[in-house]
Amino acid sequence: MKLEQRTLPVQNELLAHYWSEEAAIHSFFDYRYNDAAFSERANYLNSKSYNTEQLSAVIRSYMAPFGISNAAEEHLAELAAGAHVVVGGQQAGVFTGPMYSVHKAISVIVLAKEQREKLGQPVVPLFWIAGEDHDLEEINHTFTIVEGMVKKRGYGERSKRKTMASTTPLNQAEMERLVHTVFADFGETAYTKELLNNVLSHLRNSKTFTAFFTALMNDLFAKHGLLMVDSAYTPFRQYEKEYFKAIIENNEEIARVVVEKEGQLNSAGYGTPIEATVSNANLFFVQDGERFLLERKGDYYSNVLGHIKMTQEELLLVAENSPECLSNNVVTRPLMQEMTIPVLAFVGGPGELAYWATLKGAFDVLQLQMPIFAPRLNISLVTRAMDPLLKQYDLSFEDVTAGKVEELKDLFVDSVQDLEAQRQIDVMQEILIDQLDKLEQHLQQTQLALHNVIEKNQQYHVLQFDYLRKKLAQQVLVKHEVALRQFNLLSAELYPNNGFQERVYNPYQYINQYGPSLVDDLLELELVPSNYHNIVLL
């Protein structure tokens, strides 16, 4: 395994500006990303009081059914004693979701370890699983490579209700079908049988999307003590009830300042990532496992359909007596994290950076301070099969992301076409059309009306010539199928669907090729949070 770091062309302007020293985006955050900020934030946390003993107990109870490693035990003990926390999170996707979920976890672990050494005090990694999320269509599928092309593979079970990932029961047979299909696409290696059995074993012990996700992540990161908690876990909701009250009591002002800050962000040229409104309560009400977004309408909190309707006093009683019936959105989730966890830094991607930039005013309303925002690591894996292909076609990783593979493919296709055969077809078509034109002229002179018949005959023959051209082109491509598949494979592996692989494929595709130590070995590399793109040669 070898690490190379490259500076790639800017794909997200806001993120590029965040790494810049002079950009105006920094006015939307309490901290910049540097060592001085971490020292200042640590001092701030040392002056605050958190119930980390209860928090540690909640996390322990959540993780216990999945197994708590020795490293995780150490981190739980440190958290109970008041350790600071680096937090990152993601939805509970199948096979852990796209690779960036794993990259976030790696980022959290790397940053926690780095700051533990620099600050000289315990800093532990925590992964916040957004099990409360109800967008199952976003997490119920993955992608593989089939014959050099990107292939979507999905879980077939569907629900018309907006149930949370943590309460939606898995259809075991359907999910097993998906697992077998995906592994068949991976192809057989020395690691496949054991890896498949491992995934199936975790699946058979999992009743929900979130449980399956947690089991896999816990397995991948056991040696590194990654702590995990599900945002929809009932004991965690109980721990949050006083903080839900604070959000409810300041609800109108939170919405107002978020709208105001998003307007400023838009004026600065960064758009409106949340599209916030002053009436949005930024809370969901959970009923029978289904989430309903609340809005303030006059003196009431209600959903769009109107079957949920509560006064603020009634909503406060829900927070006190049944906090598991409440759920955060993108605005209130960061606020909840700050109130419940001693967050040294939050690790997120470009999308999260955009909506966090709208939240400074909301933190101020609750007399909170935004933690440091730490952009996650960007990682692309180059398998052993790809390295020789890159060398064969004299391509760099940057060339692939710049579209050079498709350019070479088009040039290759043009170079292998049988131009003489194409010319002969063109000549035959010209001769036939010319003869039909002459026939029509003759018939017009003899006053025989066959124009429509001749026109249809001409159209038919043109279609036949077009068909002949296509078949000829297809035969040429079949002849050069190996080279074309190589081009397709380069794009599919390294820049699928014109985007980075970390947004498409799941980690098991690479574990199947490299071996079960993939995550452990990645964490042995000199990975540091930066604006570089990390290219790892497996």
Image: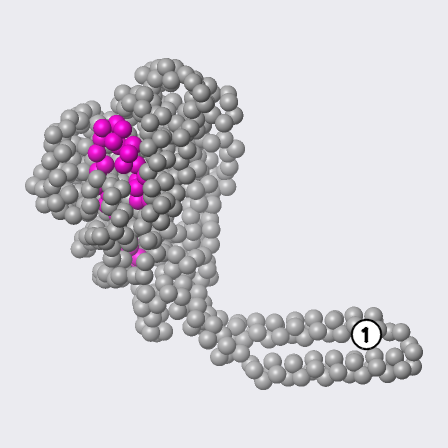
Locate the C terminus by quadrant: bottom left
Q: Is residue 292 left or right of residue 65?
A: right
Viewer-proximal residue, 403 or 476?
A: 403
- Residue 106, above or below 65: below
Residue drawn at point x = 43 percent, y = 51 percent: 143
Nearest to the observer: residue 83 or residue 201: 83
- The residue lying at 46 percent from left, 35 percent from top is 171
Q: Is residue 78 rendered magenta in the image?
A: no
Q: Quadrant of the N terminus?
A: bottom left
In the image, the segment drawn in magenta is 353-381
User: In the visual, does 461 lie left or right of 120?
Assistant: right
Q: Position of residue 462 (x, y in %)?
A: 70, 73
Q: Residue drawn 32% across and 58% down?
A: 10
Q: Is residue 468 left or right of residue 264?
A: right
Residue 369 in picture, x, y percent from top left: 21, 34
- Circle count: 1
Q: Which residue is mark 1?
A: 454
Identify whether 289 is placed above or below 269: above
| The residue positioned farthest toward the left in the image shown | 120
Q: Quadrant of residue 470?
A: bottom right
* Image x and y of residue 500, in percent: 36, 56
The answer to whether residue 380 is magenta is yes
Which picture quadrant has residue 187?
bottom left
Q: Residue furthest right?
A: 447
Camera-nearest residue between 510 and 467 = 467
Neighbourhood count class around disc 1 (C-alpha, 10 Å): few under 14, some 14–19, many 20 upward = some
Disc 1 is placed on an element classified as: helix
Whether residue 11 appears in this view of the structure is: yes
- What amino acid is labelled 1 in the image? Ile
